[in-house]
Amino acid sequence: MLDKLGATPQDNFLSMFIDTRGKDILDEMSKLRGDAFDKRYAENELAYHKEVNSLMTGSFIPNIENPEVKALFEAGLQIFLAHEHHAEMMVKSVNQ
């Protein structure tokens, strides 16, 4: 798709923030074990999917003009919404 559009992915403030934040979370979680790890992992997954889905619906998708790209993002959103639901179930499960 990127070749077809003549686009080249580039780092930006969002990708750099995600990379830095991911490293911080990895450092934090590497110190956890057992139930503490499971709970933190589940909470992180849910928070991540909520953030991505909010960003997609509130900023990205409404501003995409290319119909093919918009359709691709809309399809991806459906997958991420399902993942968010699974993460919600995982959080409930580890908090019982």
Image (spheres, rainbow, N blue to C red):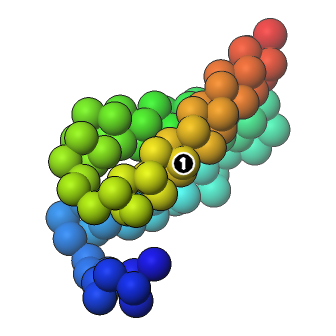
71 versus 88 height, above or below = below
Kind of residue indicated by mark 1: Ala
Q: Residues within 10 Å of mark 1 (few under 14, many from 20)?
A: few
Q: Quadrant of residue 33?
A: top right
Q: Residue at x 74, y 21 (%)?
A: 89
**Position of residue 73 measured from the top left corner of the image (x, y, whole percent):** 43, 52
Instruction: Mark yes or no: residue 45 visible.
Output: no
Give the SS element for disc 1.
Answer: helix
- Left or right: 71, with 13 as reference point: right
Q: Residue at x 65, y 38 (%)?
A: 83
Residue extending farthest to the front is 67
**Position of residue 60 measured from the top left corner of the image (x, y, whole percent):** 27, 48
Q: Which residue is mark 1?
A: 75
Residue extending farthest to the top is 96
Instruction: Mark yes or no: residue 23 visible.
Output: yes
Q: Quadrant of the N terminus?
A: bottom left
Q: Residue at x 80, y 19 (%)?
A: 93
Instruction: Say which of 38 and 11 sits in front.
Output: 11
Q: Residue at x 18, y 64 (%)?
A: 13
Instruction: Say which of 32 and 2 sits in front.
Output: 2
**Position of residue 84 measured from the top left corner of the image (x, y, whole percent):** 60, 32
69 versus 75 height, above or below = below
54 versus 30 height, above or below = above
